[in-house]
Image (spheres, rainbow, N blue to C red):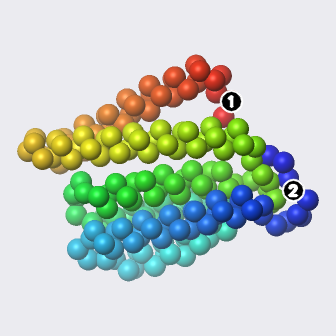
Amino acid sequence: MNPAASGNRPSRQQVVLRAVVTLAGWGVLGTAALAGTQFPWLFAAPGVVLAVLAGLLPDTGVALFLVLDLLLVWGVAVPLRIDLPLLAAALLVLALHLAATLAAGPPGAVLPASVVRRWGLRGVTLAAGTTLAWLVARVAAGASLTGTAATMAAGLLLVIGWCVLLTVRLAVAGGDAG
């Protein structure tokens, strides 16, 4: 990272990434509100605040508490279904995590283009794996297999296998340094 001469002000890149953290957190809450039968405002209200704090302080543990709150809201509000809001929420959590990871750093820091490309490729790979697992789970659920737990487990195993394969390939291909 190359700190800019802006003192304690975040770089433009950091501002954009921090905005993604906040907006993605709010997006997950929005998908839960759309997909749920009853919206748990008691748990969602802290999520609104945590999303702002995670955007302002991406180099702290606030993003972790935001993700835990979002999981709690989804667990309480949304019935176990494999539908489009679930995929949207998963992709938004991925964007939140990726943006918080990249935004963390000293104020004014600008990431080299090679780092942004590498992490962008990782994000796209995970988004593709997530979407593939969601599609497999949808097909399996439509085939009336033995319940949603088996469907979720099959999708999770697919994603884990996909991630292991791609991690090995990326590490071998580029001498992965981070």
Query: Callout 1, which amino acid?
Result: Ala
Secondary structure found at label 2: loop
Q: Name the residue type under label 2.
A: Ala
From the viewer's perspective, is 60 left or right of 158?
A: right
The reply, left or right, for residue 111 in relation to residue 155 is: right
Can residue 19 be seen? Answer: yes
Residue 147 locus on image (x, y percent):
12, 46
- Circle 1 residue: 177
Q: 110 or 40, which is in the foreground?
A: 110
Above/below status of 139 relative to 172: below
Position of the C terminus, as image quadrant, is top right
Tag 2: Cα neighbours inside 10 Å, few (<14), some, or many (≥20)? Answer: some
Q: Secondary structure at mark 1?
A: loop
- Residue ID for mark 2: 4
**Residue beneath the point at 66% across and 62% down:** 16
Quarter occupied by residue 117: top right
Q: Report the residue at 35% width, 45% height from top.
A: 131
Going 66% across and 44% down the picture, which residue do you hit? 116
